[in-house]
Amino acid sequence: MAKIKLPIDESLPAYVNESIVTLEELVRSDHFSAFEKLARLSKGEILVLKILLLQGGMATPTEISEAMNSTKGRVSAVLNALEKKGEVTREIDKDNRRNIIVTLTDSGKEHVMNELQSGYRTMTHIFEELGEQDSGEFIRMLTRVFKLMNETS
């Protein structure tokens, strides 16, 4: 893989610039696709299906939006796609006609269970290979990185 030429800030320590270049290369590598697969479990269609699964197979779009920390418009777009695939249905709530009830179909349940099992198998493999100490250190560092990223956003 070709080295990335980034604008280097000479006032920064060399390890900072080297780390940025290495991280950019890692993100572009084939290895990153596994991380993207795990990330899919926490956003979009899979997250909606997972929320429905955890809610006993039914929820309102508002409940899904709040659980996802996402806009109602984004949830609506995801629900449209899932409904077209036959993974959810939407019906008017018989008890309160102003509400819509989203229901997980058998197809949606099978899909989300397969995705979750695949993701958990991957994570299990990673943490078993890392061992207890490195797994703990990885989680500690990742938590710190996310916290620092939120501080600069």
Image: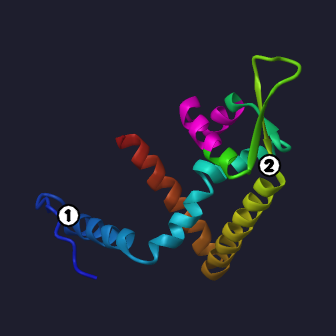
* Label 2 environment density (alpha carbons within 10 Å; few <14, some 14–19, many ≥20): some
Q: Is residue 3 above or below residue 64?
A: below
Q: Which residue is nearer to you in this view: 68 or 7?
A: 68
Q: Which residue is nearer to you in this view: 137 or 123?
A: 123
The amino acid type found where label 1 is placed reads: Pro
Q: What predominant SS class does the magenta segment belong to?
A: helix
Tell me residue 109's x, y (percent).
Answer: 80, 55
For label 1, the residue is 13
Distance of label 1 from label 2 (alpha carbons): 48 Å
Counting residues from the start of the chain, the first of labels 1 and 2 encountered is 1
Q: Quadrant of the N terminus?
A: bottom left
Tell me if residue 149 is in the magenta stretch: no
Tell me residue 54's x, y (percent).
Answer: 80, 47
Tell me residue 18's x, y (percent).
Answer: 24, 71
Q: Secondary structure at mark 1?
A: loop
> In the visual, does 73 lie left or right of 84?
left
Q: Is residue 77 above or below residue 95?
A: below
At a point 72% along the width and 63% down the height, the residue shown is: 116
At a point 35% along the width and 71% down the height, the residue shown is: 28
Tell me residue 84's x, y (percent).
Answer: 66, 47
> In the visual, does 137 lie left or right of 10?
right
Residue with the most extreme left position: 10
Displayed quadrant of residue 62: top right
The amino acid type found where label 2 is placed reads: Leu
Q: Quadrant of the C terminus?
A: top left
Q: Which residues are magenta?
A: 63-80
For label 2, the residue is 53
Rendered image: mark on residue 102: none
Displayed quadrant of residue 67: top right
Q: Which residue is nearer to you in this view: 120 or 108?
A: 108
Q: Secondary structure at mark 2?
A: helix
At a point 61% along the width and 74% down the height, the residue shown is: 133
